[in-house]
Image (spheres, grey):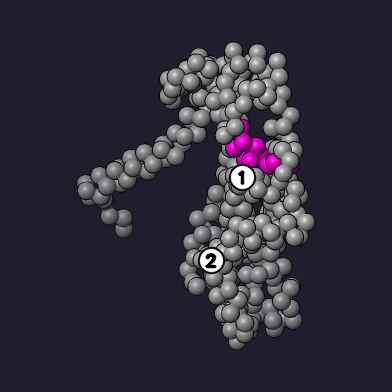
Amino acid sequence: MVLEKSYASKLFDVLLIVILIFIALLCVMPLWYTLAVSLSDKAAAAAGDVGLWPVGFNLHSYKQIMGDAKFFHSFLVSVERVALAVIVSIAVIVLMAYPLSKSTQEFRLRNVLMWILVFTMLFNGGLIPWYMTVKSLHLIDSIWALVLGGSLPVFHVILVVNFFRNLPKEMEEAALVDGAGPWLMLIKMFIPLSVPVVATVTLFTIVFHWNEFFNGLVLTSRESHYPLQTYIQQLVVVINTQTMTEDQLKTLNELSNQTLNAAKIFIAMVPVLAVYPFLQRFFIHGITLGSVKE
């Protein structure tokens, strides 16, 4: 029997919906404002007159981006980086999480390795030793410097470990009886059952590597090797009209660095916004089941 909600309960539900809508609007407003600035007139953007709607609507910034070869080259560098990072990270995380999900009777060094992982979450070697290590491996100015440096996030390993530990133990015992070994169980049983947490970790990896700019700034010495966010960050910080060509100087009458950078930032956000809806349905499930133990 379904009981009718009281007036106070209905009022609380309405209040909760209003609060959630308000929070959602707060999350969307920076993105919307960036889009409005990118579509606004140069003078209005410089004067700070742009609000939630473009002022002096135009597409000059996007037309300029279409002719910026460096922007699209950096875009492709980021796409390559994200693709390689997802493949490497997921493989390393799963291969490390699987043995760590076993008990100490099955894997005696399990607790030792787990504490080593937790230690690396709390302490790191510092920026200079990290850079010297990458340089000693001859990875400077290489795409692998951007990929391998963050290929084993400890938090992601712990999520996958806990997800594996929540899987029914009876299935593993039945597979052992049928003669399945560790590799077969991992490939045929654990990975197919772990789609939610793998999708969650994949989303985290995509967002991190797509938005990260510092490694590209430190580990690459040539602008042609910059990932997209590093390229955009340099544009936002360094504004030097003396290096512009004559044609570029003429375009200043129609656009400014502020509107142009807003357009580039908005375009840079589009890939993540496009990927998120496909992985969002796994997100909550993967997070909750991967954060129960440990």
> In front: 125, or 291?
125
Circles 2 and 1: CB atoms closer than 8 Å? no
Does dot 1 land on a helix, a strand or a loop? loop
Q: Which residues are magenta?
A: 225-235
> In front: 184, or 269?
269
Q: Is residue 127 magenta?
A: no
Reading the image, the residue beneath label 1 is 213
**Image position, residue 136 (x, y; %):** 75, 60
Look at 73% across and 56% down and name the residue there.
Answer: 135
Mark 2, Cα crowd under 10 Å, few <14 / some 14-19 / many 20+, is few
Please give left or right for residue 33 compared with residue 59 in the image: left
88 lies above or below 224: below
Q: Amino acid at mark 1?
A: Phe
282 lies above or below 294: above
Is there any visible trace of residue 76 in the rendered image? Answer: no
Q: Amino acid at mark 2?
A: Phe
Look at 62% across and 26% down and name the residue there.
Answer: 240
Q: Main secondary structure of the magenta part?
A: helix
Mark sitting earlier along the chain (2/1): 2
Outermost residue, left direction?
7
Look at 69% across and 59% down and name the residue there.
Answer: 132
**Image position, residue 64 (x, y; %):** 66, 21
Mark 1, Cα crowd under 10 Å, few <14 / some 14-19 / many 20+, is many
Which mark is on residue 123?
A: 2
**Image position, residue 27 (x, y; %):** 44, 39
Is there any visible trace of residue 246 in the rendered image? Answer: yes
> In front: 116, or 278?
116
The quadrant where residue 116 appears: bottom right
Look at 66% across and 80% down and name the residue there.
Answer: 174
Q: CA distance from mark 2 to mark 1?
A: 22 Å
